[in-house]
Image: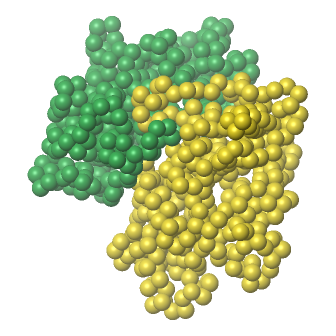
């Protein structure tokens, strides 16, 4: 079966005064319809650029973006318009992503008119009411005439999600969609996104730096971990958080503080050889993680770029050592 | 002996709509070498309180009532009554503050060395040689290379390095007390970890007291001895860290703990708190959390409950339904609340 949307060895290079920066380097990711998936990584890992490539807001320097098997950047006219409707982005900052001079009705009705989903104001109002109900802004009449400054951060983010829903998308990419809202309401926003996936079969890709959020959101799906422009591990969520294979994933999971004093004060840590994140302008040769990696082997990791390869039985990892060891372990248990 | 004793502190912001009661009747003690976490969400009054403790509140702020008593060498002073000279001495030399957003705390056009020199001069240290030695010693303490960092401008340092420099600067005059506002927010995970470990080491080595203000429960779990949760300007619960995490008695603390998923261990029953915080200008009658509280009864809407001991004398909650909360949680075992409710 072909995936609904797919990045096929996509790279994106930006030209800066300091030289070219490859923010995303040969990333391949495929998403099925209705899937809830998370991309996690620290700042500068390329997760936001990946989201922009996935939504067709950035053109890849090389590689292909496929939607329903078709190369998006080679389609035109009606096919391209269909992709634009089908794939929507929800931004991080609901304070910046909504036009402050427009009411909720104006914000939500504009795409309805633009895409001819509504022809009269009455039709638009009916649709807007329905959208507001879908994102739990009820009763809708309390919200249609409000301006963004009259709403809380969580309510604004719901309006931003409703806006993405105006065009009945098949894929929503949510970039740090909950990191700017209060802790106590994050889960309800994640639940809202998950419900959209379940009820309407929307594929949701959540981009986040917060592994706990990722674990909650993708608990029945997958997590992809990115480091310096590459996907270093792609695994089922519980396997990843319980038994990370890539040393970088392991370092992140060991380092993250937890809201539980007993666990957080006794966690197993991974000691990195260096705390310094290399500059994207001067990436290390071979595996870009090798200068920090406790498993690094001279003559291998500093020379050869590791491919993202499947390891038994539930994941793909881009690490020479982890792939070798896990494959050997598997062979040993089979024998 | 407490280093700091805050009694009945109330702080208002004067606005056109009327006074915003940002901090209401807050009392707590900070012991020597102790770490206290003040946890709350946006609008809970935590930052107003922190800034109020060193009297740096912006114009338009009114300390309506209360005392901030600071004790050193057996002498107790009310910070609210200090004159400008004594206040300058108290700030930084006695009580240093590390502000949120490390990037914005520096003067962007001078080097890190000059930032050290500026701070030293403001407190009467003019010997460049001695300031340099002290700066090098402090940077070493926060695991930075002084030779590289001192000549650098702020923009040349990473977020984590800037946060370390700020911590070093805060410690320059050997304060008894350090207040940190969101010390790890906006830092990457591995950097956050290194800052947490650093704060733990420094506290052990230098023995200062620490107050940190955060929305992030996990940093409290990491570092705090005691914890306060604030809601709508008030302290709603105050407890030792283990009691707060495993045996919360205020429904808001419980809700907040349950709203944060974990990476390790079972996920449990994670859930958001419905609704949003009240308007601080027109506070509702009775308990300000009642509108969002699943356990509220009619009596909750009558009077704002006082902060009273529950379970043990060291554990206080402002809730008349705390026994019911205890029943809902069932076990007192050291298990996260999301698991108890699963």
Q: Is B112 rendered above or below residue B15?
A: above
Q: Is residue B158 visible?
A: yes
Tell me the residue at 74%/27% (across/down). A295
Residue A202 percent location from the top left of the image: 57, 69
Q: Is A171 rendered above or below residue B67?
A: below
Residue B174 percent location from the top left of the image: 48, 13
Q: Which chain is yellow?
A: A
In the rendered view, does A57 fall on the left or right side of B107?
right
Task: Identify the image quadrant of residue A259.
Answer: top left
Q: Is residue B103 visible?
A: no
Tell me the residue at 67%/62% (across/down). A31
Residue B329 percent location from the top left of the image: 26, 41
Please state which of residues A148 and A36 is positioned toward the viewer in this rendering.
A36
Q: Is B74 rendered above or below residue A141?
A: above
Q: Quadrant of the N terminus of chain A?
A: bottom right
Please state which of residues A180 and B279 is positioned toward the viewer in this rendering.
A180
Tell me the residue at 53%/13% (across/down). B124
Residue A207 percent location from the top left of the image: 61, 53
Please state which of residues A167 and B306 is positioned toward the viewer in this rendering.
A167
Q: Is A79 rendered above or below residue A10?
A: below
Q: Which chain is green?
A: B
In the rendered view, does A70 fall on the left or right side of B199?
right
In the rendered view, does B276 fall on the left or right side of A148?
left
């Amino acid at each position: 079966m072909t995936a609904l949307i797919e990045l096929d060895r996509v790279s994106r290079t930006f030209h800066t005064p300091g030289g070219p920066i490859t923010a995303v380097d040969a990333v391949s990711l495929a998403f099925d319809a209705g899937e809830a998936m998370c991309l996690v990584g620290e700042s500068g890992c390329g997760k936001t650029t990946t989201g922009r490539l996935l939504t067709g807001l950035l053109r890849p320097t090389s590689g292909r973006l496929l939607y329903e098997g078709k190369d998006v950047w080679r389609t035109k006219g009606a096919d391209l318009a269909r992709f634009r409707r089908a794939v929507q982005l929800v931004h991080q900052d609901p304070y910046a992503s909504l036009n402050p001079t427009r009411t909720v009705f104006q914000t939500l009705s504009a795409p309805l008119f633009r895409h001819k989903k509504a022809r009269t104001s009455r039709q638009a109002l009916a649709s807007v009411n329905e959208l507001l109900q879908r994102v739990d802004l009820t009763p809708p009449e309390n919200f249609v005439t409000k301006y963004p400054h009259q709403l809380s951060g969580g309510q604004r983010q719901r309006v931003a999600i409703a806006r993405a829903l105006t065009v009945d998308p098949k894929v929503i990419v949510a970039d740090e969609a909950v990191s700017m809202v209060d802790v106590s309401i994050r889960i309800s926003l994640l639940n809202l996104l998950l419900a959209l996936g379940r009820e309407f079969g929307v594929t949701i890709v959540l981009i986040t730096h917060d592994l706990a959020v990722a674990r909650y959101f993708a608990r029945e799906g997958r997590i992809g971990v990115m480091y310096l422009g590459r996907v270093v591990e792609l695994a089922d969520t519980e396997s990843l958080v319980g038994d990370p294979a890539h040393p970088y994933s392991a370092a992140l999971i060991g380092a993250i503080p937890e809201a539980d004093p007993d666990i957080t004060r006794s966690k197993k840590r991974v000691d990195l050889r260096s705390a310094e994140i290399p500059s994207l302008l001067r990436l290390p040769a071979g595996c870009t993680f090798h200068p920090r990696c406790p498993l690094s082997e001279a003559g291998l990791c500093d020379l050869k770029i590791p491919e993202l390869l499947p390891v038994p039985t539930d994941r793909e990892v881009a690490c020479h050592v982890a792939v070798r060891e896990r494959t050997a372990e598997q062979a040993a248990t089979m024998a | 002996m407490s280093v700091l004793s805050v009694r009945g502190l109330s702080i208002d912001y004067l606005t056109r709509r009327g006074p915003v009661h940002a901090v209401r009747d807050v009392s707590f003690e900070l012991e020597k070498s102790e770490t206290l976490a003040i946890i709350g969400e946006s609008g809970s009054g935590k930052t107003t309180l922190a800034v109020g403790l060193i009297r740096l509140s912006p114009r338009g702020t009114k300390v309506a009532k209360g005392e901030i008593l600071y004790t050193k060498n057996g002498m107790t002073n009310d910070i609210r009554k200090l004159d400008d000279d004594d206040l300058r001495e108290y700030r930084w030399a006695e009580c240093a503050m590390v502000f949120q957003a490390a990037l914005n705390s520096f003067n962007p056009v001078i080097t890190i060395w000059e930032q050290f020199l500026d701070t030293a001069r403001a407190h009467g240290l003019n010997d460049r040689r001695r300031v340099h030695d002290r700066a090098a010693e402090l940077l070493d303490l926060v695991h930075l290379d002084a030779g590289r960092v001192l000549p650098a401008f702020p923009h040349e340092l990473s977020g984590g390095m800037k946060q370390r420099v700020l911590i070093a600067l805060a410690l320059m005059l050997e304060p008894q007390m350090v207040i940190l506002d969101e010390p790890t927010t906006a830092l990457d995970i591995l950097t956050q970890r290194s800052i947490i470990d650093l704060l733990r080491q420094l506290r052990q080595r230098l023995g200062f007291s620490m107050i940190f203000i955060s929305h992030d429960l996990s940093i409290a779990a990491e570092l705090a001895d005691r914890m306060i949760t604030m809601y709508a300007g008030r302290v709603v619960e105050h407890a030792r860290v283990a009691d707060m995490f495993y045996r919360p008695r205020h429904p808001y603390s419980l809700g907040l703990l349950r709203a944060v998923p974990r990476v390790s261990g079972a996920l449990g029953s994670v859930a958001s708190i419905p609704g949003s915080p009240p308007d601080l200008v027109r506070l509702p009658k009775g308990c300000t959390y009642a509108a969002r509280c699943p356990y509220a009864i009619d009596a909750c809407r009558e009077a704002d409950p006082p902060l009273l001991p529950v379970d043990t004398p060291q554990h206080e909650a402002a809730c008349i339904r705390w026994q019911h909360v205890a029943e809902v949680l069932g076990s007192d075992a050291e298990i996260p609340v999301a698991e108890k409710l699963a």
